[in-house]
Amino acid sequence: MRKTLLFTGVLILACLFFTGLVFATGEKGAPEVSGPAAEKIIKVGFIYVGPIGDMGWTHAHNQARLMVEKLPWVETIYQESVPEGDTLSTIERMIQQEKCDVVFTTSFGFMDGTIDAARKFPNIIMAHASGFKRAPNVATYMADFYQVYYLNGLMAGALTKTGKIGYVGAFPIPEVKRHINAYTIGVREVNPDAEVHVRWIGAWFDPPAATEATMALIDEGCDVFAFTEDTSTVVEVAAKNGFPSFGHYSPMYDASPDYVVSGQLVHWDVFYLRFLGLVYSGILNSGNLENLDYWGLLREGDVELGAKPGMPVNPAWIGRLGDTHDLVLKRLEQMKNPQMVFDPFTGPLYDRKGNLVLPAGARADYLHLLTIEWAAKGVVGPWPNEP
Amino acid sequence: MGFRIEKNPAVPSRMVVFSFSVLSLFLASAVIGIIFLAYGINPIRAYTDVLSKTLGSFYGLSEIIRKSIPLLLCGAGLLLVFRTSFWNIGAEGQILMGALAATWAALFSNFPDFLLIPCLFLFGFIAGAVWGFIPTVLKSRFRISEVITTLMMNYIALYIVLFLIHGPWKGKTMRGFAYTDKFPASASLPLIGNTRIHWPTLIIALILVAAIYIILTRAKLGYEIKVISQSPKAGRYAGISYFKTVFWVMIISGGAAGLAGAGEVAGIHHLLRHPNQISMGYGYTAILVAWLARSNPVITIMTALLMAFIFVAGDTIQLSFGLPSQIVNVSTGLILFFLILSEGMMRYRISWKSKEG
């Protein structure tokens, strides 16, 4: 009883102390910062699907936001872990209460909410990542990795000794299928008999499931690993068992410098800076975004090959890659070329059932890639919705 | 002069309950204020800002009302069940089953347009009621604890929804993403003006609160619940079947949660998406809504609004001051913690002892 009493007393004292503190700080009242009268300030709101500390998708967008904020004429705010059903409310709050001029919604599930908000606020500029619905004041944008996955596939094909490569996928959706297909096309280019074994974990963030999937793939005899999900689990588990792997999304070189061969890196700032620059200069406005569907690849600079910026291939692995290293660099240059003289999805391409999916000489267009459901030759494992 | 703390046998009066709750809110704000200070934010300024952007703005108020709708439906239903000491932790799953049934009605039923919305709610109610009914059967037949079964059935509902959106119900217009197709316009609930308040669900919720009030005060079922809540044994001697009573209250409670789910998909989402995005823990928060309202269903209107306010205030503060969402969650957790603490404290009193004593 005495203890409870003591505790209550301490609590009350703490509160009194705090109240005093508040009034002490409150009275001073920090003066409002008034910088040099800038001509025009653009206030930008970012809506994130996850927490900014997720080391994946949301983290990458937030890193870009921090770079954007360095511009003298940009101010940013963000809301993280926004439920999809709250998209419209959050945009409304950003516009009405926080006076945003531009809103970026950074996940597919925000699509309908963004379009509804755009109808409600026709003068506000919005852009939605990874979706396909636009409006005069809503653009869409995406940075896609398929070309980088293809390059990593070339390396994986050269490195495998068992001829089996492990791939951990989040969900069997077109984005992930596109990655696996591009990777497999790369693998088969250098190693025509190699297989890519796929395991789905049904989550973007689930380290235990990713660990289990990687262990199962090791048991199947896989000796090189890649993945599309939002953690570095596959890299860590592969390294623990002495197998090379490829990082994804965030720089994962430091997670295991001895075993990370290369990987995919994203630079969302490339799009954000370009887009906001055009908004600032008045070229883009709330009436002309209907046909702006930005699709950032190697050529645009939105994505980069490597497990660490500025290091396309881990130097420790260049020797083991042999001739393939030169092929990787050559293909990289070809895809960076303004004419994009090479693309992995070029016909003739057959799916794993033997159907012709791209005739000779044809290149998969944007819609084909966005809605891809077929499985490339060499993919092994379940493939929901396979045509 | 000394004093000691002792258990207060008397039931706390309304005044005590109210003042303790308000006091606990103040204490919570004080502790949260310390967190704000650590982030270099002046708490007084933060609180005035939050109040002006929630209670002081039309937009903020409309969002509070919108978020209170599912909480009210589930909370009022749970209040009824908890009176019988049947611990239904399964409102979350009952919401999802309601959402699922409403989605079926909206997308695959081919009901004529004018019947669609009533059918959405009817199917939602039935699905939630069935989901609530199963644990009562398991308890009456096999004596399996309802705490376990209702909780586990939440996960079953969650995985059923996941299976459907990744499998047979995956929308053809969604380009491979795991969502159903959008509902037709005739299956979308009307909204109040420029807000996002889907008023049909709100009205159903208010009617439900009134109905539960009448059940508890006027109906035979209410009388039986009262007897059981005082003493199940006495109920048995009076010829009141415990399980029969529980069946009925669980059908009402599960059905109410199902209605909440139907309202969410038809009023907010207009499609079926990842289960965690549909319910967001309303079913669990509703336990608190019911509990804080004690035994009076009318009070759930206040407690549901209070919970909704806490959530909307959290969103506002994150956006206005750039606080990490985790810190915002800690803050809402602290508020709930203090509210629960105050419940316990009401049951004690301080007795002053004179020098002689």
Image: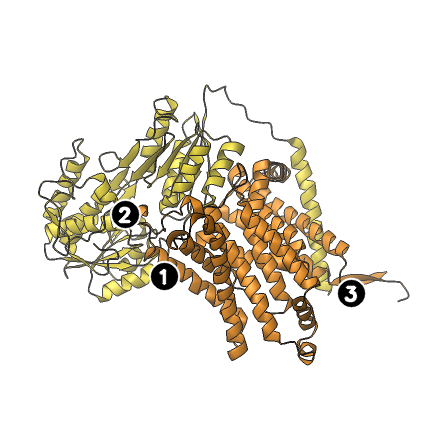
Chain colours: A yellow, B orange
Name the N-terminal-most of marks 2 and 1: 2
Q: Nearer the viewer, mark 2 or mark 1?
A: 2
Q: CA distance from mark 2 to mark 1?
A: 23 Å
| Vertical position of residue A80 compared to residue B157: above or below | above
Amino acid at dot 2: Glu
Q: Is residue A99 left or right of residue A175?
A: right
Q: CA distance from mark 3 to mark 1?
A: 51 Å
Q: Position of residue A301 (x, y in %)?
A: 26, 35
The disc label shown at residue A175, or none: 2
Q: Are the residues under badges 3 and 2 in a single subunit?
A: no
Q: Position of residue B194 (x, y in %)?
A: 52, 36
* Labelled pair 3, 2 in contact (Cβ < 8 Å): no
Q: Looking at the rendering, in which quadrant would you find the C terminus of chain A?
A: bottom left
Amino acid at dot 3: Ala
| Vertical position of residue B80 compared to residue A56: above or below | below
The disc label shown at residue B249, or none: none
Residue position for label 3: B10
| Viewer-closest of B307 and A186 | B307
